Amino acid sequence: MTSRCIDDTCPVARSVAILDGRWTMLVIRDLLRGTRRFSELRSSLDGISPKTLTDRLRALEEHGLVERRQYAEIPPRVEYSLTARGAELEPVIEALATWGGGERSLR
């Protein structure tokens, strides 16, 4: 484990800053399953508002974790997928799923 640090030189602090937000990790989890349209993500994330989903997708795109592809069709079609950098989070999501599956109570 790295030494304690609280500024932007700390890898953990930087990661938390990027992945912060109630729905962020769940958006990544769903995109690990493949390319999704906005409506598909919204359906799979019960309770997320369209604005929050838009905000999370934009932030992930700004950090280079998500790619947004817009097609010149009518009606417009937009798809989201993880970049190679975003896909690197798969073992992190799997570790959280394993840890969360074993944690039966939130103290």
Image (cartoon, rainbow, N blue to C red):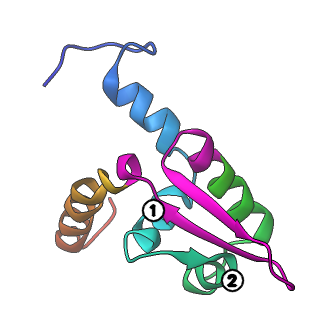
The magenta span reads 59-86
Residue 65 placed where, x, y %? Answer: 48, 48
Residue furthest to the right in view is: 74
Residue at the image position 63 percent from the left and 57 percent from the top: 57
Q: Residue furthest left?
A: 1
Would you call the spot at circle 1 few (<14 residues within 10 Å), some (14-19), or many (20 or more)? Answer: many
Q: Residue drawn 28% across and 59% down?
A: 90
Q: Position of residue 69 (x, y in %)?
A: 64, 64
Of marks 1 and 2, which one's residue comes earlier in the chain?
1
**Relative to residue 97, is residue 84 depicted above or below?**
above
**Which quarter of the figure is the N terminus placed in?**
top left
Q: Identify which amino acid the numbered label 2 is placed on.
A: Ser
Q: Helix, strand, or loop for circle 2?
A: helix
Say above or below: 64 vs 44.
Answer: above
**Numbered label attached to residue 12:** none
Q: Amino acid at mark 1?
A: Ile
Q: Residue at left 45%, top 73%?
A: 30
Front-most of residues 71 and 37: 71
Quadrant for residue 72, please give it: bottom right
Closest to the observer, 20 or 42: 42
| The stretch drawn in magenta includes residue 60 | yes
Q: CA distance from mark 1 to mark 2?
A: 15 Å
* Residue at mark 2: 39
Residue 21 is inside the magenta segment: no
Q: Which residue is mark 1?
A: 28
